[in-house]
Structure formats: C-alpha cells, structure tokens
Image: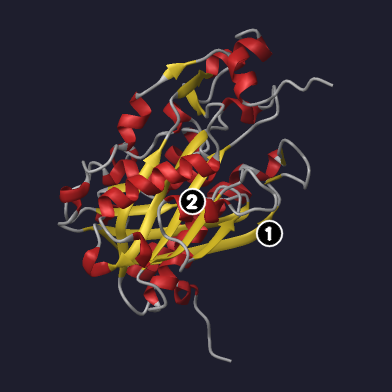
Amino acid sequence: MSDYKPQDGLMKPDRPVGIVGYGAYVPRYRLPASEVSKMWTNGTGGTPIIEKAVNGLDEDVITMSIEAARNAMQRARINPQEIRAVWVGSESHPYAVKPSSTIVAEAIGAVPNTMAGDWEFACKAGTEAMQAAIGFVGSGMARYAFSIGMDTAQGRPGDALEYTAAAGGAAVLLGPAAESVAIINGSYSFVTDTPDFWRRAHAEYPSHGDRFTGEPAYFKHVQGAAEMLMESLGTTSGDYQWAVFHQPNAKFPERAAAQLGFSKEQIKPGLLSPRIGNTYSGSTMIGLTAILDIARPGDRILMVSYGSGAGSDAFDIVVTDKLPEVQMLATTTEAYISRRTEINYATYTRYRDKLKLS
C-alpha cells in the first residue's frame, strides 16, 4: 500500500475543463427579515439578513433551473444537442419520483441523446454535480455537461431558518477549456459524517443539530477543503482576486474568509445572502455567477461550497479573455436581485403553502 498524503486528493481532469456558459435566476419577491421578526418576536429579535427571495406561485426548482440554464446557453452559444448531461442539484425537487433534470433537458433542447439526473447533498448538491460534470467532460465522455444548483428552501414557521431559507440559484455549463470563459485549475472535496442538519422522508421542514452547526460542520469543512486545495496548488489568499464561500447568512462566510486570509473586498461581489437569503444548493454557485458578471481576464477565483451532513467542494478558477464577450448576453445576477417586489408575511405564507387547512 502506497503512502497517502492529503494533497493527493486534488482533483484535476485528464483534459482541461472550464465554464463555457453560466446563468443565474432569482425570483422577484422579497420577504424582509423584519416581517419574520414582527411575526414571531414582536419585532424585538435580531435579523441575520436584510431580506430573502421567495418564489412565486408559478415557480419551482424546475422552472427556475430552466431560466438559469437558458441564460447559460445564451452565453455559451452552443448547439444544445451536444450536451451529454443535465444534472440538477436541489433540496426541494418538486417530485419525489420524477426527475427535475429531464424536464430541464427537454426545455433547453438537449434531449434525447443525453444523460439526466437529480442530485442531493444539502446545500452542496449543485457543486457535487459540478464535480461530476468536470470529470465527465475531462474524461472525454462528453463535450458539454450542465450542473445546476437551485432551491426553494423552507424553514419551519418561527424557526431561525425561516429568516434565511430562500429561493434561487445558478447553472454552469462545463466544456473544453479552449472554449471556456473561465478554466477550472483544480478542485478538492472534504467530507465527514456530521449531523448538523437533516430532513427525514415525508417531513415538511428540516431539523438542525445546533451544537454541530458552526465549528464541527461549516467551518471545519469549508476551511478543510479550501486549505487543502490551496496547499495542493501552492496558492495563498493573495493569489486570488475574488472568493465566494457558502453563505447561509452573512457572518459565516465573512468569518471563514477572514480565517483563510481573505479580505472583505475579495468576497463582497459574491456575498449575496444579506439581500436574497440562503438559496441552499444555489448559494455558492450564484455567488460565482455574480463574480463572473464583473470579473476581468486573468482574475483568479476561489469558490468553496458547503452542504450539511457534511461536506465542502473547493474550486480554483481563472477567467479567460472570452468572458467579456459574453457577460452581457444574458440577464446578470445583479439585475435579478435588483428586480424586487416586497411582500408581507401573510403573502409569504400563501406563496409557500404554509397555511394547512384540515
């Protein structure tokens, strides 16, 4: 048996792979955190964010994934028939038995000669699919593969998660590095069995193990994946123009960034949770799309996701000179965020089907 070093966990495909197209989607409705506070604490409790995005009555993971994927296709400018995988990561697939991915694949014109599958790993389901897509393209089995992270997250009424659990996400089309707007230099995954958050079958709302939430879960995994990736590639925080970390709130990614040596300026463009909440499987990926919307050729980006249960995926990404050509070919992440309609708690309960009439 050969000696194993953690650095051996660095993942690099046989063929260089990059992001050929990217797109985001955020529904227009916004629930101010103050509305949740007024309902459950008479306005006396603190709020972890400003407001969160809420999907409308006619929106779900499938419809939002289609919008994000179409935005990515507008930037990629490829024939959808060349896409060999459409993978959708989410905690809130509309069907228990019926893939979201097949509907998305049909809507973007990728059927019938393609794979389709739904992924689950709490908030890192989207980047888990992205890791697989990199391997799929990098092995030569596919020219293009879609990874999508999208959610319509819910928190139990009155629970702390109700302030932040939000809707939205992003789609990333992986393909040959030569065609890419950003190249994946390498990635690293860090996983343990940590019971910080879960939802049992048939349960409507998730539960969380409070004492596992911070240090043994989020920070251990985010820092573990980021540190091992940077050590394996010989980089430090100063080598990156931008960084984005999974953002269940504002405090966690800010603290993780500081512990890893990143400044507030490096994480500012991708830190969206104060304005749209925690989009779960879409959280890290939509932070990446916001950065790609403003990045310039040569910029280096560190992206680190986190999913309860628990695990993190870290990616080292470098922008190519093709990015400026496509940034404005589809709706930007900021445009979706700025397009907002404020709702009150009563409207929110209707939109999210929280009123159960027996």
Q: Quadrant of the N terminus?
A: bottom right
Q: Residue furthest bottom?
A: 1
Q: Quadrant of the C terminus?
A: top right
**Where does the image place residue 187, in percent across and percent down from the top left?**
41, 65
In the image, residue 239 sits, relative to residue 294, either above or below, namely below
**Where does the image place residue 200, in percent across and percent down from the top left?**
77, 46
Contact between marks 1 and 2 (CB within 8 A): the answer is: no
- The residue sitting at 32% across, 66% down in the picture is 175
Q: How is the image coloured?
A: secondary structure
Depth check, front residue: 61 or 127: 61
Under mark 1, the amino acid is: Asp
Q: CA distance from mark 1 to mark 2?
A: 31 Å
**Where does the image place residue 241, in percent across and percent down from the top left?**
25, 49
Residue 166, quarter of picture? top right
Q: Residue furthest right?
A: 358
Question: In this rendering, would 109 be left or right of 332?
Answer: right
Question: Which sits earlier in the primary sequence, circle 1 or circle 2?
Answer: 2
- On residue 124, which mark appears? none
- The residue sitting at 69% across, 22% down in the picture is 158
Q: Which residue is mark 1?
A: 193
Q: Which residue is mark 2?
A: 104
How many C-alpha atoms fall within 10 Å of the one at disc 1: few (<14), some, or many (≥20)?
Answer: few
